Every structure is written in C-alpha cells, then in structure tokens.
Image: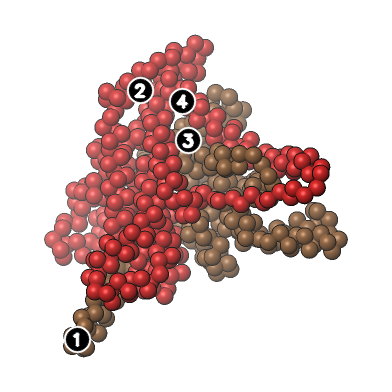
Amino acid sequence: MAEVVVDTPVPPRSTVGDESRDWRKALTGVGLLAPAIVIAIIFSIIPLIYLINVSLTRESTFFFNNPQYTFDNYRLIWNRYLPHVWTTIRLATLASLFCLIFGYPFAYILVRKVQYRDLVRILMTFPLFGPLYLTYGIRFVFGVNGPLAPLFDFIGVDSRTLLFAYPEQMTIFGMAVFTFPFMVMNVVAALTNVDPTLEEAARTLGSRPWQVFTRVLFPLSWPGVLAGFLICFGWNLGVFIVPMLLGNIEQQRVLSLALYQKAMSQFDYGLGSAMGVVLMLLAFTVTWLSLRFSRGALAT
Amino acid sequence: MSETTAIGGPSRFRSSGRWLTSGLQHAYIWLWMALFVLPFLTTVYRSLEDPKGGYSFEGYRFAFGSFQDALILSLQTTIVTIVLNILISIPAAYAIVRYPIPGKRTILAALNVSLYTPGAVMGLSLSLLFAYRLSSIQGSFWALVAAYVVGTFPLMLIPVIVALRDLPTVFGEAARTLGAGRWRTLLRVEIPLLGPGITAGILLTFVIVFNEFLVTLFIAGKGNQTAALTIYNILARAGFAPSTAALASIMQFTSFVVVLLFFKVFGSRYLKGTYLG
C-alpha cells in the first residue's frame, strides 16, 4: 500500500555497445515483471473494464446474446440512489474524523511518552484482522449483558437498548475502530520526524500548550495527518459489514451493501455494476489524492 | 497533551500536576488497547457459553467438526496464495529495483490498482469475469486463489522492494567475483538477505487472506466456503451462535499467534511502510 519511490540505477554510459546491452537488460526486466503484469491485467484491470461495460447495459442482458446498451443505470443512481452515495460519503467522513480526533493524541502520546510501543503495536493488529470479527465482537461488547453493561448502567444509559438506540453512532464507532490503526501509523510516522526540541523551544518562549499544537506540531505533521485521513476515508468508503451488523436501514444505505443486494440477490447486474463504478471512482479519487499529498513517503 | 510548567509556582503542585497528566495519557493509551482487544475477548467469552445454560466447549467441538472443511480450505488458500505471491513478487521486485524499464511508475501503479479497489467492487467485477469468460474455474479453489493473489501480491511486492533497495549490490558483486554463478548468488546470498522483507510480505498476506470474506462472498462456489465466509453466512442467515463465535475466536487467535511469532522473531522494523507499520 506504500507507494514506493524507486531509484533507477544509473546505467553505465562509458563504452560503445552499451546501448544493446541496455536493451537486453530492459527486456530481461520486462520478462521478470511479466507474471505480475499478466496477473494484474487478467484479474484486476480486465474485470474492472467488464464492470464498466456491464454498468452500461440493462439488468442482466450483458450475459445474453444481444446486450441492451443504456445509460439508465446511472440515471437511476442520480434519481433514486443519490442518498446511498451521500450516506457512504457521510459515514466515511465522520468515521475518519473520529479517527483523526482520537488518533492524533494517541499517536502523540505513543511517540513521546510510551515505552511499551511494541505491546501497543501488537494489540493494534486485532482490528486489522478485519471488520467482520471486529463488528461481531462489538455487538457482544455493547449488547445485552456485555462486559461494559455495568458501566453504562452506572452512567444512566440503558445497556439493553444501547445497540438499537444509537445505530449511527455505533456504525461510525465500528468503522473508526477498524481504521484507527491506519490513522495512528501515519501520524506516528509524521510525528517521529518532528524534533521534540522544537516543542520545548516553543514552550520556553512562552507558548501555551494549544499554541504549541496549532503553531508547531500540527503544521509539521499535517502531511501525515492528511495521508492518514485519506487512507481511513478510502477504507471506510468500501464499508460493508459494519452497517449491516451495527446500523439500521438508514446506515445500511451504503454503496457496497446496495451493490451486493442489487447484483447478487436481485440479479440486476447493470445497476449493481453502475454502483460499483461510482464507488470505484470515489475510491480512486481518494487514493490519488492521498498518494499526491503523502508524496510516496508515507504508507497505508 | 503536554504539561504546563507554571514558572515560579509551588513545586509540589507542579509535580503532582505532571503525574496526573502523565497518568491520564497512559490511561488513554490503555483505554484504546482495551477497545482493540475487548471485542475479541468478549467473542471468546460468548463462544464458551452453552445455549442451554452454563459453559461448555460445545461451540469449539462444532467449529472443529462441521466447519473443519472451511478451516482447512482457509489454510489451503492462504498457503497457496503465499507461495504464488513469493514466486510473482521476488522477480517483479528485482525488475523494478535493478532493471531499467521504461514507465516504471505507471507499471507499479497498475500493479497496485487491486489494492485500492474496494472489496465489494473487486468481488463484483471478478464475479462478472468468471461468469462471462472464465466459467471453467468459476467458483473453484483456483478462482479464490486468483482473487487473493491479485489482491495481495502488492503487499508482498512492497516490503521486498524496500528490502532490495536497502540491500547494497556489493554482496552480490562480491559473490560473483569470488566465482559464484548467477543462480548461486541469488539463492545463497541475495534471497537470504531479503528474508525479512519476504517474511513481512508473508505475514501481511496471511493476515489478509486468512480473514478475507467480502471478495470471497461474491465469487465462492457452493462447496468452497472459507471459514471467514462461513461466519458471515451463518451470521447473515441465523444471527449469533456460539459456534460462529468459536470459529471467529479460532481465526483471530490463529492470526494473532502468527503476528506474535513474527514480532518475536523479526521485531517490528521490517514492517515499516507497510500495512502493519
């Protein structure tokens, strides 16, 4: 997921006849790359071309002898499924903001104060095992008789109805816990490069803590923050299982779920593919932005 | 976040304030660590509950009994994917780092497209491909492996590229000067030096493929349900059950043990710049 900056070795240009050797070397290189390229073309690029193609046909006519080409699927998305697009973007934005607001302090403390960093890193892999188990577990944690039930009863929240009373908050929380490690890693990478003496200098010169943050820390770490935000956003755009298990009808209007229902349950491949194309465009825009801003130095 | 030092203030007040901030900071870290682990621990706890009351290993007996095929399939697909990823990524990394190829950035971007495609989009587009052109492998073991390989080989490629870039060419040159052949140099000198990068790739592939369910949901055939997909399917149809909780516990526990082993043997430095940072 990292964009890797590649140093091209400088080809020797001293003697005559190097040109043909360069050619041969380039050919060997292409040969070595061939399996990777073939796999990527067959199983990644061509399927996406099919997806675009199918999105321009009516229902499942693509698979019959005379596919009916039409823009109706996109018109339908524009007229009826725009709320799905907005819900996808809204949930992704809110979850990524949650990650940013809670992840920045986390990363700061981790970099500056914590000695047991490896323990944190190891425990942080649990959300990375995937949103399926995570959401499944969160259902138990906040469900009836969950481990936090006494706590919620103590602060006056009814733990028995917690899951159903706050579907939006629960969904955003579930998405945020899954992407939290991505945010933390990016901010940690950025903060590690910020010299702590700069903060001390600012403090000695009379800055208040929040001024140290707004004038020194944040400006120096914002590329990492932005990269982290966009990566979280990209992951959250494809959210599928979290709203399914934690949200209600309102949150389940996300593109991934809708395209699954349309294509795989109702066999309306045209509409499902069109939703897929919209989702793909959103995701690629976000990826392009994050690669631009992170300048290849920071990684997912 | 950072403590204020009130200049000239009473020193006892100052140090107790510092203790308090420091304590709060550590409490914040531990709160999040609890949040990371709590879903897993609660799942384990629920998996031990017997529907009839009390506690039992019934869920695990069920998981290792009825879901045995699914667990084996998950392991098989993961291992085959790892092997194929290694075979594809090492030559590709060599080509990208050591060979003058035109349009390197574009090629690398094209190879990474699958990483940036949302799971549902990838699943749907692959299911279209298998239905329309590759019906011979539709729903089969190899369809799953193909999807996993294309989705994860960039995760192997990146650590190997990073390791290869950090590896000075002098080792290989020295071996060649001392009379080792091209293949011998590669197998005895360079690949062992790349080991940690390759291992990082193996870890990433394992964690993702072993737990993947979304792409699998779109392309798996009737007889090819991986363990993660089994959890999803039962969840979608029948809701929560101790047997799926047991299966989810087993999957997470296995993944965690693999991660722990990796950290124990290699430390975290070879994961820099990758998904597990």
Q: Earlier in the sequence, mark 1 or mark 3?
A: 1
Whole-percent x, y for residue B70 in the image: 52, 46
Q: CA distance from mark 1 to mark 4?
A: 69 Å
The residue type indicated by label 3 comes to: Gly
Element type where label 3 sits in the image: helix
Number of the label disc, if any, that sits on residue A74: 2
Residue corresponding to mark 3: B123
- CB under 8 Å between callouts 2 and 3? no
Question: Could you say whether the residue bearing mark 4 is in a helix, strand or loop?
Answer: helix
Image quarter for residue A149? Answer: bottom left
Figure colour of chain B: brown
Residue at image point 20% right, 53% down: A162
Contact? badges 1 and 4 (CB < 8 Å)? no
CB under 8 Å between discs 2 and 1 = no
Report which colour depicts chain A.
red
Q: Residue A52, labelled with which disc? A: 4
